[in-house]
Image: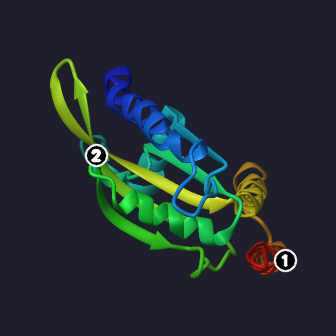
Amino acid sequence: MEWEKFFEPYEQAVAELKVKLGYLTTGQVKTGTRPVESVTGRVKSQASIEEKIVRRHLHEDRLALDLQDIAGLRIMTKYIDDIYKVVELLRKRTDFTILEERDYVMNAKPSGYRSYHMVIEYPVSLYSGETKVLAEIQIRTMAMHFWATIEHDLNYKHGEIKPEMAKQLAEISEQTFSLEQELSEIKDME
C-alpha cells in the first residue's frame, strides 16, 4: 500500500475540521458560555492501522470503510451538559454528514469508558478531485479524558489489565461521573 497517498485525505480532513470546529473554543454560544475547552485531532498511525488489519482480519482495500477512526477529532468540555450542547451544534452543521452516534456518556462501556462518539462523512477536495472520508469525533469532559488516558495507558501500554484492576477502574469512572454531576449542579446554582 502507498501509505503517504492513503493518509493525504485524512490529514487534510483533520486539519480542516480542527479549524472549523475550533470556533467552539473562542466564541460564546447562545447560553453566553463557552462549551468547549479544546479541539484536538490526529490521523491514526500506520503502525496502529497495520495492527488493526492483523487483529481484526481487515483487507487493505476496505480500510476506508472498515476503520471509522483513521481521522479522529476530540472535543473537550468542562461539564457533562456541554457535551450535549456541542452535539446539537454539530448536528446543525451542513459541511459534513453524521452517519452514526454512540452515547457512552450516559451509557458507559463496561470498562467505565465515557464519551460521546459521532462518525461523520467529510468531503475533502484534493488535486485528483473530491473524496469523502470517514472521521470520528469524540466529545467528552476533561475528567472523562483524564480517566480514558489512564485506562488506555494501563490497558494498551502495560498489557491487558487484571480483572480486579478493571473493576477498580470502572468504580473510579463511576465516582468521577458522580463528582462531575455534582460540579454541574453547583454550576447551575449561579
Q: Is residue 153 left or right of residue 36?
A: right
Amino acid type at circle 1 is Gln
Q: Which residue is mark 1?
A: 168
First in sequence: mark 1 or mark 2? 2
Image coordinates for residue 21, horizontal then vertical, percent: 47, 43
**Which residue is at the front of the view, 109 or 32?**
32
Are there few (<14), some (14-19), or many (20+) residues within 10 Å of tag 2? Answer: few
Q: Which residue is mark 2?
A: 95
Q: Is residue 118 left or right of residue 189?
A: left
Q: Is residue 139 left or right of residue 71?
A: right
Residue in the picture at 37% in, 25% down: 3
Residue in the picture at 74% in, 49% down: 157
Q: CA distance from mark 1 to mark 2?
A: 42 Å
Q: Is residue 41 left or right of residue 114?
A: left
Residue in the picture at 59% in, 41% down: 26
Residue 115 visible, this angle: no
